[in-house]
Image (cartoon, helix red, strand yellow):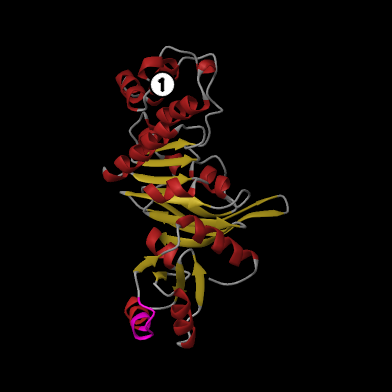
Amino acid sequence: MINVDHLSKRFGSREVLRSVSFTAEPGRVTGFVGPNGAGKSTVLKTIAGLISPDAGSVSVNGTGFADAVHPGRTMGVFLSAEWLPVQATAAGILNYVCRVQGLPLAWGKETLERVGLAEVAQHRVRTFSLGMRQRLGIAAATVGRPAVLVMDEPINGLDPDGIAWIRSFFTSAASEGATVLLSSHHMAELAEVADDIVMIADGRILGNGNVGDFVSQLDETGYYLESPNVGSLVSALVQRGFQVKRERAGVLVHHADPTTLASVAVESGAGISHLTRVTRTLEETYFEVLARNASGETQ
């Protein structure tokens, strides 16, 4: 578990974090989202012990990460693949990490196999693509088989096969009880793996909870209807006080229940040929929450 408790941080006169609090639970993938400059990297670096907050605290499985007896087994952190020495081989890097952390060297070999780099274990990093470096960085972060994973934009540079692999990697880790905190700008991919969402902007939390609650918070669930006589259906719905939007071959109606909509369609003589529930995507909700925050609207 990761518990972030009222983190605040300034860099000079700039307030980067403002009483940021959230929890990432074991057995779940928590998506951490927000625009550039929102404070995500500062939070992740604070969790990793690379930055000291001005106020507040972070605990990893009940204690500060800096106090962990076996940090590599406690939490795996991937913030960037840029630290990888380009003259070293993949196997050499994993062997070094294992020695530093007091891990069996066999774990390094097994981890390279798990991330799909076993065949290039003796190749130097300078020959790797960005996606391969991402995989190697993730391997270095997870070789200790930690119970907590903190990942910053791990999808960057991955091809479709790599994205499918990392999706499976994180969901499998969570299913085995790991705490996974995943920062990403790829909303469609995040929606495939995340159980919970934490959204940050301007250094403060805008949303925090399971994905379903986050997406439904704006109460914009609607219904899409098609009819043999769309014009008559629109007139009937407007007369009943519904706000109607023409969409493709039908209409979109918010703040209504399907039974009432179907009754209006039948009673008006317009008829109904199709009725389906329409919900916002994670990406749509994200941008709407950002827009409301920018305009000063409260959630």
Of residues 51 and 249, the one nearer the viewer is: 249
Specify the farthest residue to the left.
176
Count neighbours of disc 1 (C-alpha within 10 A) and say few if under 14, some if 14 to 19, many if 20 or more.
many
Tell me the kind of residue under disc 1. Answer: Leu
Q: Is residue 235 magenta?
A: no
Residue 43 spot, x, y in % from top left:
54, 48
Of residues 67 and 175, the one nearer the viewer is: 175
Q: Is residue 51 above or below residue 22?
A: above
Of residues 18 and 39, the one nearer the viewer is: 39
Residue 204 spot, x, y in % from top left:
57, 60
- Residue 174 visible, this angle: yes
Residue 121 spot, x, y in % from top left:
40, 15
- Choose top left, top right, bottom left or bottom right for residue 176: top left
Residue visible at 47% across and 37% down?
A: 154
Helix, strand or loop at mark 1: helix
Residue visible at 30% across and 49% down?
A: 27
Q: Which residues are magenta?
A: 264-271
Of residues 217 and 142, the one nearer the viewer is: 217
- Choose top left, top right, bottom left or bottom right for residue 267: bottom left
Q: Is residue 290 above or below residue 252?
A: above
Residue bearing mark 1: 94
Residue visible at 53% across and 33% down?
A: 80
Residue 236 spot, x, y in % from top left:
44, 84
